[in-house]
Amino acid sequence: MADEQDKPLSVFRKRWRKFQKLKRGWYSFLILTFAFALSFLNPFFINNRALVVHYEGTTRFPVLESMPFVPGTGHIEAKELGQRVIGEARYRQLKKQYAKEDAGNWVLLPPYPFSPIESLLTDPELEGNPPHAPSTRHWMGTDDRGRDVFSRLVYGFRISMMFGLGVLIAAYAIGTTVGAILGYFGGIVDIVGQRFVEIWSGMPFLYTVIIISSLIRPGVGMLIMILAVFRWMRISFYVRGEFYREKAKDYVAASVAQGESSPSIMFRHVLPNSLTPIISFAPFGLVGYISALVSLDFLGFGVPAPTPSWGELVGQGLRNIGDWHLVLFPLGAMFLTLMMVVFIGEAIREAFDPKVFSRLR
């Protein structure tokens, strides 16, 4: 036990411990990680489909049956549950019907029984035209199409985080690979590669998205690919510089002398020692990618309707500036999320500063 305690910590573990001591960034990291993980359980907490329906001795699970990994039609017809409407069952009404009939049938709804894409224009409990102000039933009111704002914000958080992380992984993978090749081989490869990067960085991103959107309606996956193709150049510059610095060290010469291949030296030896800029800039890249999605949705070139989107809600707030809940809640959710990501980025940049662990003590 004493030997384990006396064993010196690796540089990464020292940096990780320092990151944990930077409370603002560490707590932001925990909160965002927990919220993002919890967002994958959204259908069980925020949904207009029932969790469980018991009807005439048969128990059904509408939430599970509507999920893609469960075979079936995707929804349960109202007539299958004794409800006299056409199409899919309306579970909030069905719960009231069963309670009124008192025949031993029952419905268990999610804690917040509203879907982000469900229009509530025919809901008898809402008076007047949308948007509706916040209430005990609709915590953040409804938008100008009668959809619940709270459920759209919660589902929009998951889409924004998945989009930002998807672009981050794809763009950094491309940029790291290109930067590693240019920095390691140098010479004519670096000269030609740099000219290509400079030309590609001059391509108009927004015009390209507008052209693609005029031809097809891009989904989240295609938007991730488009943004990644246009956002990898910056990280390639940093990785290129790190590879230029690292390839001059003795361990690279020793690896070459042992006959290791160039890809092995690049990605097994040099890359692990060149991760500082990648790790340091990743949170700030995430902020930019989330903001890019919000901007595209605001302009109408983002995710297809009726996908829950923060940018679309911000656009509604601009069009309905007098309805304070459409301005305050979307902008507040964006502000809090991006602020926590920035806190994480600042803490990581301080913890992973190479100057801190490069001095002899």
Image (cartoon, grey):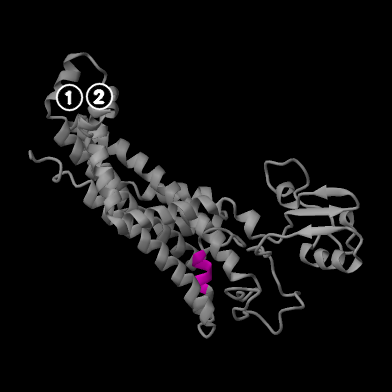
Residue at the image point whose x is 83% and y is 53% from the top: 54
Q: Position of residue 206 (x, y in %)?
A: 41, 59
Magenta includes 86?
no
Please state, as top left, top right, bottom left or bottom right, where the N terminus lies in the image.
top left
Question: Which residue is at the far front?
Answer: 2
* Stretch in magenta: 310-315
Asked if marks 1 and 2 touch (Cβ < 8 Å), the reply is yes
51 versus 192 height, above or below: below
Q: Amino acid at mark 2?
A: Ile
Give me the C-alpha separation between circle 1 and circle 2.
7 Å
Q: Name the secondary structure under disc 2.
A: helix
Considering every residue shown, the one lying at the far top of the view is 258
How dense is the environment of label 1, judged by Cα within 10 Å: few (below 14), some, or many (20 and up)?
some
Residue 342 marker: none
For residue 98, side relative to residue 200 (left or right): right
Residue drawn at the location 56% of the way across and 50% of the way down: 40
User: Can residue 199 be spotted in the picture?
Assistant: no
Q: Residue at x 27, y 45 (%)?
A: 17
**Residue with the mark numbered 2:** 265
**Viewer-proximal residue, 258 or 261?**
258
- For residue 27, above or below residue 233: below
Q: Which residue is mark 1?
A: 252
Percent position of residue 23, x then y: 30, 57
Left or right of 339? Residue 52 is right
